[in-house]
Image (spheres, rainbow, N blue to C red):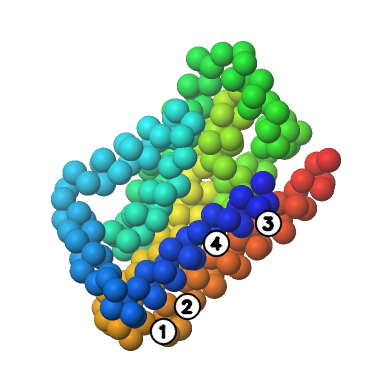
Amino acid sequence: MYSKSSLKVLILAIILLAGLYLQQSGIIDLSREIARAESLAELWWAPVVFIFAMGSLYTIAMPAAFFIWILGVIYHPWPATLMVIAGGALGSIGAYYFTGYLSTAVREKFARTQAFSLLRKNSGFFQLLAMRSLPGFPHVLINFSCGILQIPLAAYIYSTILGFAFKGYIYTTAVHNATHHVHESGNNIVSFQTVWPLLLLVVFSLGGIFIQKKILKNTC
């Protein structure tokens, strides 16, 4: 699980750095692509589609975190974060109830995961919030483990909203600032404004891995 959490952040950082390099070298016009993506923000129905799509994927145990990257490019961090919260909460609640229709074999598969073992030992609000907020704990596993274990719904919903708010704001801010500095400044892209979002993601990931190890050690 640690390697996967590190890999996700490295992939995001590589994508951003690759875009910056291609823009600097003149191979692509990233500012034009960003302008095209931003045009979606003018469509009133786009947020509804993004929220519903994100929620639907989480409901059926499919990864949907890539929407955070997309929303970070299209929208400013605050509206993007609100959409991340709405889509994440919708999908989490949907998955919670969808577990009632799972077969025994599928339930047993989720029961063998680390997320399930952690939540079976400690399903308090702060445990849920830590798992939601930090890298390394896939939301799909949290959603379905909580549904199978029938974690109290109030703590589940509140921790979900706060967790997606915290993680969503960090990621959308990092993506938005890095990509839109390129869009606004053209080829002059090597600056603190383009580097600090990537450093933030790395620090956030490493901190999450450290705390995750502590949680696993304390619950073993």
Q: Which residue is mark 3?
A: 209
Residue 76 x %, y %: 31, 63
Mark sitting on residue 10: 4
**SS of the residue under disc 4:** helix
Q: Earlier in the sequence, mark 1 or mark 2?
A: 1
Kindly indicate the quadrant of the structure image that contains residue 71.
Answer: bottom left
Contact flag, marks 3 and 2 (Cβ < 8 Å): no
**SS of the residue under disc 3:** helix
Mark sitting on residue 190: 1
**SS of the residue under disc 2:** helix
Q: Earlier in the sequence, mark 1 or mark 4?
A: 4
The CA distance from mark 4 to mark 3 is 13 Å
Residue 209 x %, y %: 68, 56
Residue visible at 49% across and 31% down in the picture: 61
Mark sitting on residue 219: none
Residue 181 x %, y %: 33, 76
Q: Is residue 56 left or right of residue 41?
A: right
Contact flag, marks 1 and 2 (Cβ < 8 Å): yes
Question: Tag 3: residue type?
Answer: Ile
Tell me: residue 148, above or below residue 121: above
Question: Tag 4: residue type?
Answer: Leu
Q: Earlier in the sequence, mark 3 or mark 1?
A: 1
The CA distance from mark 1 to mark 4 is 19 Å
